[in-house]
Image (spheres, grey):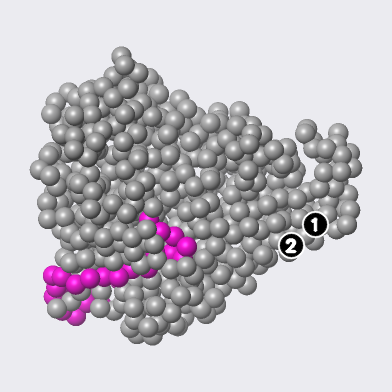
Amino acid sequence: MRPRGRKLRVTAVAGLAAVALTAAGCSSTTSPGASATGAPASGGTATIALPAGVTYSNIFPFYGVTEASVYNLQFQYLLFRPLYLFGNNTDSSVSINYALSPASPPAYSNGGKTVVINLPGWKWSDGETVDARSLIFFLNLAEAEKANWYGYSRGLLPDNLVSYRATGADQVTLQLNRAYSTLWFTYNQLGELKPMPMAWDVTSLTGKPGSGGCVTDSKADNWAKCKAVYTFLTAQSKIASTYASSKLWAVVDGPWKLTSFSTTGNVTIVPNKSYSGSPRPRLSAVKFVPYTSDSTEYTALKTGQLDVGYIPSADLPLRPTSSVLPATNPLGSGYSLQPFYFFGISYAQPNFNNPTVGFMARQLYIRQALQEVFDQPGIDKAIYRGYAIPTSGPAPNAPPGNQWIPAAQSENGGQGPYAFSISSAKALLTSHGWALQGGVMACQDPARCGTGIKQGQQLKLTYLYSTGQAAVTAMWQTYKSDASKAGIDINLVGESFNSIVGQAAPCAPMGPKCAVQVFAYGGWAFDGPGFEPTGEPLFATGAGSNAGNYSDAKMDSLISATHTSSSLSVFHDYATYGAQQLPFIWDPNPYTIQAITSKLHGVTFSPLFTLLPEYWYFNK
C-alpha cells in the first residue's frame, strides 16, 4: 500500500462493471481462499503492515481536508459503516455494496428531485438503531459545519438540498433543487453520508445520548447546538491516546471495534459482537503495524513477522510483459502474491495562491514545461520495475482500459498530451521570455512571462514530498535532475504523509497561510468524496479538497455538466480538458505487489482501499 492523498467516480450503475479489472489481467497467484486445504478456523490474529510513513490519525468521520486520507477512511469504515459502502472482497469492484451497507438502495421519484432512503434497522453496539435520526444527525452537522467538512463543494450537498426530513422511524426523504444524474447523486453525494449514533450527540463525556440537541437543531438558532456538538467531538478526536478507552468511539455499527490505539501507529481491532451485517468476523483480532521505511517493512515480511504486507519495487524482479505479477516470488512459497491497483490519480499539486510561485503556477505553459520534464516511462522502468502506469489526466488510467479514459489521456503511450521532452520544455520557456542564468531559467520579458512574474524572477519551486518509501524518493530525485536540464530548479523537502496532508488546505490568494508551493503527497483515490471520478472535490473552485486553489470557469462548467448527465462523452469532455489544462503535474501511478501468508485466506485488495478483514480466516 502506497501513501495517497485525500479521499481519494458512466452511463448506468451497471456500467461500472466495465471499470473492473479483467480476470486475466489481475488474477493473483492464488485466488482468495483457493489455497485453503482445511476448514476455516475461528480465531487467530492477523498482522498487517501499514504503508511506510503512514499511521491512522483520525477516528471521527466528519472532518476537514487536513484530516482526509484513504487510510483514515479505511480505519473508520472498519468501525463505522457509511450509509453506502463501496467495494467488495475482490480485487476489482468499485460499485456500491448494498449488502454491506446499513441503507437500502435509494429510490428516486418526482423526475429525480425526490430521494427516499430506507434504513433496514442495523444496530449500534449500544443497542440503538441505525435509523432516520442517525442520518439526520449527519446532515445537520453538514449544514452547520460545511466549511469544515472535507466532502463539501460549493453548490453541492448540503447546498443542493431544498429539504430533508424523517418520513418514518427508518426513512429519510430528500428534496433536491434540481434533477441530477441518479448515478452521480448516489455515488458522489449519498456516498458521502455517514450515520452517527445518538451517543455522539453530546457536548460532554457525561452527557446523555441526544442531549446535545443536534439531531433536532435547525437554522432557527444558526445551528448553534450542532456547532457545539461538532466542537466537542472534534476536540475529542484530537486526543488519540483515548481512542480505545473513550465511550464515544466504543459505539460502533461496523464489524470491528477498537481495543488498542497507539499514537505511534500500532492499532488492534477485534470483532463487534453486535454487528448486524454479514459475514461476521472469524478472526479474533487484526493488528496494524506502522513502519518508517519500506525496507524495515520488507524485513518484517521476510522474517515472518507479518501476515500481510507489500514488497518494495526495488526488491521485485522486472515485470514480465505478459503478466501483472513478477515471474518469481521473492518471498518463496510461504506467501502468495496479489496486485493492488489504485482507482485514482497520482500527481503533484501546485499551489496557485502561493505568494512566491503562485503567479508562475497559473501560467499553463509553465505547467506544461513542468509536465514535460517528468519521465514517467523511464521512472516506471528504472524505479518501479515496470509496476506503474502513467497518470495523464483527471480520469484514472488504472485499471488499464477502463471506460473513463478519454482519447487525450491515451496519447504518447499513456502520457497524455505532454510527453517527456526536456528540449520541448526548454523551448516553451524561452519562447515565453525566459533565459538561462547560472543554469536556472530567469524571466527576461515580464510581458511574455505572464501576469505577476517579475523581471529576473527565477523558475524555482519547492516540492513537499512524502517520505518513507525509497521508490518515491528516487522518483522525485530523478524528476529534480531532469527538470534542472531544462533550467527548472526543484527543491525537494521530505515530510511524513500525515504532516503534508495536515497542511493541504485551501488558502487565501497569495496569503500568509499559503506557505507550501507544491504538494507531492501521492495522489487521490476515488473512494470519497465521490466514487464516480468527476472532479468536483479536486478541481471545482472553492472545493474543500482543492488545496492547490485551482480555479477555472470552463472546468467548473464541465464538472457541473457531469452532475446532470450520465453520458460518457460528457465525462470525457471534462477529463480531456483537465488533461490539457494540467491543474496538477501528473506522475506515475504504481501498483503494489502485496504478500499474504499462505496460512491466511480470503484476503483481497480493493482499488478503493476498502478493507474487509471480516472475510479473512486461518485454516484449522
**Which residue position is annotated with label 1?**
486
Please state if 40 lies on the left or on the right of 366 as rendered: left
Q: CA distance from mark 2 to mark 1?
A: 7 Å
Instruction: Give coordinates of residue 128: x percent, y percent.
Output: 12, 39
Please state if 414 lies on the left or on the right of 54 as rendered: right
Q: Callout 1: few (<14), some (14-19), or many (20+) C-alpha neighbours within 10 Å?
A: many
* Residue drawn 13% across the image and 38% down it: 129
Quadrant location of residue 214? Answer: top left
Kindly identify which numbered label has been placed on residue 141: none
Magenta stretch: dominant SS?
loop
Instruction: Give coordinates of residue 246: x percent, y percent.
Output: 23, 49
Residue 86 in sight = no
* Residue drawn 60% across the image and 32% down it: 508
Tell whether position 53 is magenta.
yes
Quadrant location of residue 375? Answer: bottom right
Q: Callout 2: few (<14), some (14-19), or many (20+) C-alpha neighbours within 10 Å?
A: many
Q: Which structural element holds mark 1?
A: loop
Residue pushed farthest bottom? 332
**Total numbered circles:** 2
Q: Which residues are magenta?
A: 30-56
Quarter the N terminus occupies: bottom left
Q: Are marks 2 and 1 in contact (CB under 8 Å)?
A: yes
Q: Could you say which is closer to the camera, residue 31 or residue 87?
A: 87
Instruction: Give coordinates of residue 598: x percent, y percent.
Output: 29, 79
Residue 230 in sight = yes
Quarter the C terminus occupies: bottom left
Instruction: Give coordinates of residue 198: x percent, y percent.
Output: 19, 35
* Residue drawn 60% across the image and 65% down it: 473
**Which residue position is annotated with label 2?**
482
Tell whether position 600 is magenta.
no
